Image: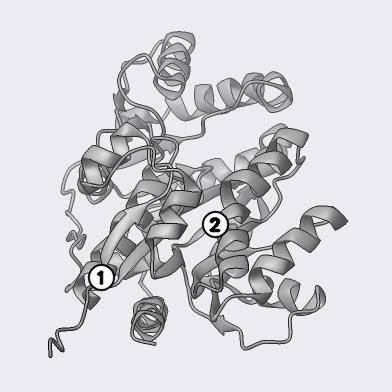
Amino acid sequence: MNNKKQTPIVSLHGASRNHNYGDVLLMAIYKNWIEEIGGEVVLDMANDYYGRYLNVQSHLPISKAVNKANFIVYGGGGYFGEPRNPSLRWRVKFVLHHMMPGILSRLKGKPYGFFGIGFGPLDNLFIRKIGMFVINGARIVSVRDEESKQYLIKYGYKGKIHVNPDSALSLADINSKYYVSKQINKAQKRVVFHIPLDPGKDFEMIRPALVDFLTRIKQIQGNFDFHFLVDHGLGKHCYQYLFFDQLRKDLDVNWSIKEYISPEDTLQFLSTCDSVITTKLHVAITSYALGVRPIGISKHPKTQRFFKQIGLSNLQFDLYDLLDSKKSLELQSIIERTDKISINSLLIENALNNKKLLKELLQS
């Protein structure tokens, strides 16, 4: 009799349809964990970039990925929380892109779990019911902050809720495949601006204030090494690169723009920085994990939650604070300071709990 244990196939789900640094990094971390535990990974609806980078099949439909898998893993991310002004398009993507793996898994009786996800708010009743249907069928539910836990309880979840920080924090562990040591700058302090504005209301309202703010910052550039950072899109023709390039022209500066190539390349760059001013959660999370001071410009409540979790709420601002002269000056004064941060080792240890829970699911 052949008693050799078969390799479990795991359908890993995340935001795998774009070229976003944080989403790609999370999928890479979870894929590495799954393979270390002994599983084989398929990724639903991975674009060509994901396919090449993670060495998985591209464009595998969700239904085929679920049918093929023994387990379904939701690998972190903020897709369970509505943005500031949720659109019909966001709600359609929420159901068809992110809830469908869980819906199919529950209907087929396949074991699945959530690991280090952000949850809530889901104010739309229909969207909330779909979300809770998926959550209620999971074997393991791990959320990344207390606020997510409270939303689950508020919406009627009765099962066990694990609270473990975002798995991207695990890269601060020296044993992580993605560990990068912090580089020390002995000359100028390197400060990175990552405040891309999406087309629409925010762009029209905030861009003039952003230009005014950076014009003031420009006056102290002799003391700092300023850069822009792209975390979404490839090459010099992607939206973020063009946005920052136009800012350079408006400001008449030659600050370099760091293109997005891969998570490892971005991590290496971030490790050379002293401060990173960003609107994106995972740029802030990974900066912190590297020992780099993050300064948050929130477009979503999830960013506020993270800065509260790491005890640095004083370094977190709302995007619309750029329109407030007092807040804008406060932000400038923080950038001019050269404070160091210390990493909370307990948060890193707890982030690694997501790997332990993942092993628990795959060995069940």
Q: Residue at x 59, y 22 (%)?
A: 212
- From the top left corner, tell me how far across and down residue 322 is, in percent: 66, 35
- Work out how far the residue at label 1 is from the one at label 2, CA to CA, in angstroms: 18 Å
Q: As displayed, is residue 128 above or below residue 174?
A: above
Q: As displayed, is residue 68 above or below residue 323?
A: below
Q: Which mark is residue 137?
A: none
Q: Residue at x 18, y 48 (%)?
A: 185
Identify the amino acid type marked 1.
Gly
Identify the amino acid type marked 2.
Pro
> Which quadrant is the C terminus positioned in?
bottom left
In the shown orientation, is residue 24 left or right of residue 64?
Answer: left
Instruction: Tell me if residue 121 can be seen.
Output: no
Q: Earlier in the sequence, mark 1 or mark 2?
A: 1
Which of 211/101 is in front?
101
> Which quadrant is the N terminus positioned in?
bottom left
In the shown orientation, is residue 308 left or right of residue 179?
Answer: right
User: Element type at marker 1?
Assistant: loop
- From the top left corner, tell me how far across and down residue 125 is, in percent: 87, 57
Q: Residue at x 50, y 50 (%)?
A: 63
Report which residue position mark 2 lands on: 101
Using the rendered view, name the quadrant where residue 192 is placed: top left
Q: As displayed, is residue 167 above or below residue 127?
A: below
In the shown orientation, is residue 51 left or right of residue 151?
Answer: left
Report which residue position mark 1 lands on: 39
Q: Residue at x 42, y 53 (%)?
A: 65
- From the top left corner, tell me how far across and down residue 110 is, in percent: 50, 72
- From the top left corner, tell me how far across and down residue 91 is, in percent: 73, 43
Given contact means CB atoms under 8 Å apart, are the residues at marks 1 and 2 in contact? no
Using the rendered view, name the quadrant where residue 173 is placed: bottom left
Which of 8/275 is in front?
8
